[in-house]
Image (cartoon, rainbow, N blue to C red):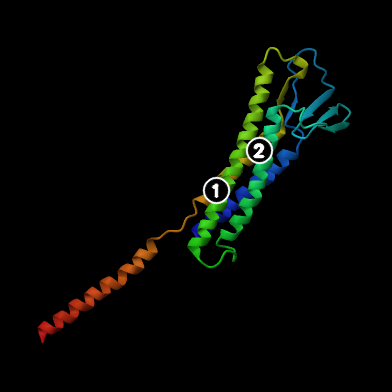
Amino acid sequence: MANSGLQMLGFVLALIGWIALIAATIMPQWRMSSYAGDNIITAVAIYQGLWMSCVTQSTGQIQCKVYDSLLQLDAALQATRALMVLSIVLGVVGMAISTMGMKCTKCGGDDKVKKARIAMTGGFIFLLGGLAALIACSWYGNQIIRDFYNPLTPVNTKYEFGAGVFLGWAGSFLTLIGGALLACSCPRKTTGYATKGYPKTGGARTKASSAGGKEYV
């Protein structure tokens, strides 16, 4: 029962983290315009994400534009895109495999050892997906910090962390924790050795009793 609960907890955490990664990938608020300078116009806020950039005015009007060309984007943004998409795809594969290997499902046969190994495989895939998302968010965040503290970067073009980066970090950590719990749900083999030991002791006792009986007669 404890092993089954551990699998369920790991699957739920990985599922929540996977949903958070999808939301973070879609969100345009990966970095937002900074108000560090004195001559910054605060009536307009600029947000940039992995797929589009948005401009929010003080009146509440929002205008978004999808990036025109993929080749014109910098290498950091392209790598972040690829890693986030890869983490989402690995999450789908991890969910499918983990569902087959969990004890609460009837997929994958009745062999408990085989199902546990399938669940462990799904956990390792979740770990790979969470690691890819963590690298993507950390890489993008490092790029924001480098551009912010670069003295050659104009003040009007400096950006700070947006909500998408924090949501991506949270989703990657949840996916890593869920994958680790699934990967650690391995079956114990102590029961097999215990059952094998009982007939030997029983046979020894019966031999001793029979030998004693012969001597008595």
Q: Are marks 2 and 1 in contact (CB under 8 Å)?
A: no
Q: CA distance from mark 2 to mark 1?
A: 17 Å
Using residue 71 as the reference point, say whether residue 2 is left or right of it. left
Residue 137 sits above or below residue 144 on the image: below
Residue 159 sits above or below residue 117 on the image: above
Which sits in the foreground, 4 or 85?
A: 85
Amino acid bearing label 2: Leu
**Residue for badge 2:** 83
Give x and y (percent) for residue 65.
84, 32
Label 1 neighbour load within 10 Å: few <14, some 14-19, many 20+: many
Furthest residue toward bottom: 217
Which sits in the foreground, 81 or 2?
A: 81
Quarter location, residue 78: top right
Q: Image point 61% across, 39% down: which residue?
A: 132
Quarter location, residue 39: top right
Q: Earlier in the sequence, mark 2 or mark 1?
A: 2
**Residue for badge 1:** 124
Residue 64 sits above or below residue 214 on the image: above
Give x and y (percent) for residue 83.
65, 38
Pick the quarter of the image with the C terminus: bottom left
Amino acid bearing label 1: Phe
Give x and y (percent) for residue 138.
62, 31
- SS state under label 1: helix
Label 2 neighbour load within 10 Å: few <14, some 14-19, many 20+: many
- SS state under label 2: helix
Q: Image point 61% across, 58% down: which residue?
A: 99
Furthest residue toward front: 71
Which sits in the foreground, 80 or 198?
A: 80
